[in-house]
Amino acid sequence: MINSIIDILQLSHSYADGTKSIHHLNLRINPGESVAIIGPNGAGKTSLFLCLAGLVSFQASTFNISGINALEGNNKSLLPSKAALLFQDSDDQLFCPTVEEDIAFGPMNQGLSKSEVKQRVEIALEEVGLLEKRTKVPHQLSGGEKRRAALAGLLAMNPDILLLDEPSQFLDHRSRRSLINILNKNTHTKLIATHDFEMALETCTRAILLDQGKIFADGPAKTILSDASLLSNHGMEVPYSQKLNR
Amino acid sequence: MLCMAFLKTPTFAVVGFGASLILLVGTWPDLGWWLPRICWIVISLLVFILPTPFLTPGETIFEWGIIKASKEGLETSLLIFLRGLAISTLALALIGSSTIYDLVRGANGLGLPSKIGSIFWLGFRHLDLLSHEFKRMRIALRARGYKIKPGFGSYKTIAWLSANMLVRALDRSEHVGLAIKARGFHGVFTSIETPKTTLHELGFFFAMLLLPSLLLILDFWLGN
C-alpha cells in the first residue's frame, strides 16, 4: 500500500465571522498525483489550500502532510516548506525588488547558505523559463511572467506538494500554454484549484468536486469532468472538449 | 543635508543649492523626472516662507495698512527657502540615484532595525499596489460617466472610493501577509546579494563628507 502524502480526516475550517468554509472533509492524496480541485465560487477551495499550507487555524482528527503530523506540537509551522501555495493573485506573492530576490526569499527563510540558495534560484528560473528576467522588478512583468515568477518562488523552496490556486486565471493563451507545459513537466504532487476545466484535463489525472466545504465527487478527471448532471448540479458545465467527445 | 540645515548666510545657501543641483543633474539627467518635483517643493516651501517677512519684527521695507514686512524677515525667509531647496534637491539626488530597496538595505547597514526596514519596504510596495488599484477604480468611475464636481453626490462618491480603497488595502495586506508566511518568513529580510563597497564609492563618500563641511566652515568664518 502506498503511503499517502496528504492524509486528512474530519477537516473543518471557519472564517472569523463563524461561517463554515470546510465541513468534516476527508482527503487522501498519493505522492506524485496531480489532482484538480473543482467547484463553484465559495466552495472552499482556497480555504482548503490555506489549511493545507498551515496558514490558518483549523480542526481535524488526522492531519498528516508529507510525514508531518500537523496536530502535534508546533508542527503546523513546518507545513509551508512541505506544501507550497501559489496564490490567486501573483501581485500578493511578489514583493521583493527583483525576480531573483523574490525567488530566493523562501529558501533564505529556510536557512540555506547563499550558494545553495543561488543554485536553487538558478534551477527554478530555468524550469519556468525566466532566466533572462532575473534582474527585473516583479511588478513590471507581464501577467504570465508574474505567475511563472511566483511559481519559481515555490519551486525554489523544494516542497513536496504544490498547491496552485487558479493558476491559469487572467492568463492569455500563450502564457496559459506555457504554464500547462511547465506543470506537465513537473513531477511534484500537485493540487490545482481551477475553473479552467480544459487545463485540468491536460494536467490532472484525478479530480475532486468541492461544494459548500464538502467533497461531492472524487475520481478520474475525465470521468468527473464529463459528467454533465453532476457538474450541472453544482453550477458548472462540461468543458467543450468533452462535449465534442460524446 | 545636515550641513545645509546649519548654513547661516544666503550667499552660501545659494552655493549649497547650486552644488546640490549639480549633483542632482549628475545622478539624474532626466529633467522630466526632477523638474516637476522641484517645482512642487518650491510651491510647498512658499507656503511656509511667504508669511515670515510679515511676522518677523525689524526694519520695515514694505507697508500696506497694518501689514508690515521687515528686512530681517525677508532675509530669514530667503535663507529658509534656499536651505530647504538645497536639502530637498539632495534628497532627490539620493532617491533618484538608487532604488528604494538599496536605500532600505543601506539604512539597515547603518543600524536601522531590520523590522523597520521591512515595514518601510513593504509599505512602499503596498503603496504601489494601492496606486494601481486607485487608477483602476478611477478608470471604472470615468467609464460610467463620473466627473468630479462640487456637490454632495460627488463627495459621496469620493467617500465611497476612499472607503473601498481602505477595505481593499486591508484585504490586500492580509493576502500579502499570508504569502509571506507561506514562504517561511520569520521577521528578518535577507538578500542573496552581499553588498561590497567599491573604491569609487569610498571616494564619493569622503567628498560628500568634506565639501559640505568646508562650505559650513566657510559660512561660519566669513559669515560672522
Image (cartoon, coloured by chain):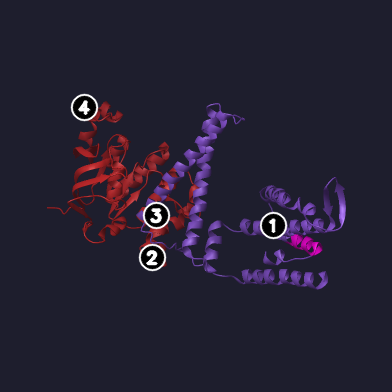
Chain colours: A red, B purple
Asked whether B18 falls inside the magenta stretch, the response is yes
- Structural crowding at the residue carrying mark 1, measured as other residues with C-alpha within 10 Å and reported as few (<14), some (14–19) or many (≥20): many
- Structural crowding at the residue carrying mark 2, measured as other residues with C-alpha within 10 Å and reported as few (<14), some (14–19) or many (≥20): some
The residue located at (59%, 29%) in the rendering is: B151
The residue singled out by tag 3 in the image is B180
The residue singled out by tag 1 in the image is B89
Q: Nearer the viewer, residue B49 or B31?
A: B49
Disc 4: host chain: A
**Both marks 1 and 2 on one chain:** no
Closer to us: mark 2 or mark 4? 4
Looking at this view, name the residue that lies furthest to the front.
B66
Whether residue A140 is visible, yes or no, is no
Task: List x then y, in percent, for residue A11.
Answer: 21, 47
Closer to us: mark 3 or mark 4? 3
The residue located at (26%, 41%) in the rendering is: A20
Q: Earlier in the sequence, mark 2 or mark 4?
A: 2
Task: List x then y, in percent, for residue A21.
Answer: 27, 41
As drawn, A157 above or below A46 = below
- Structural crowding at the residue carrying mark 3, measured as other residues with C-alpha within 10 Å and reported as few (<14), some (14–19) or many (≥20): some
Alpha carbons under labels 3 and 4: distance apart: 41 Å
As drawn, B16 above or below B30 = below
Closer to us: mark 3 or mark 2? 3
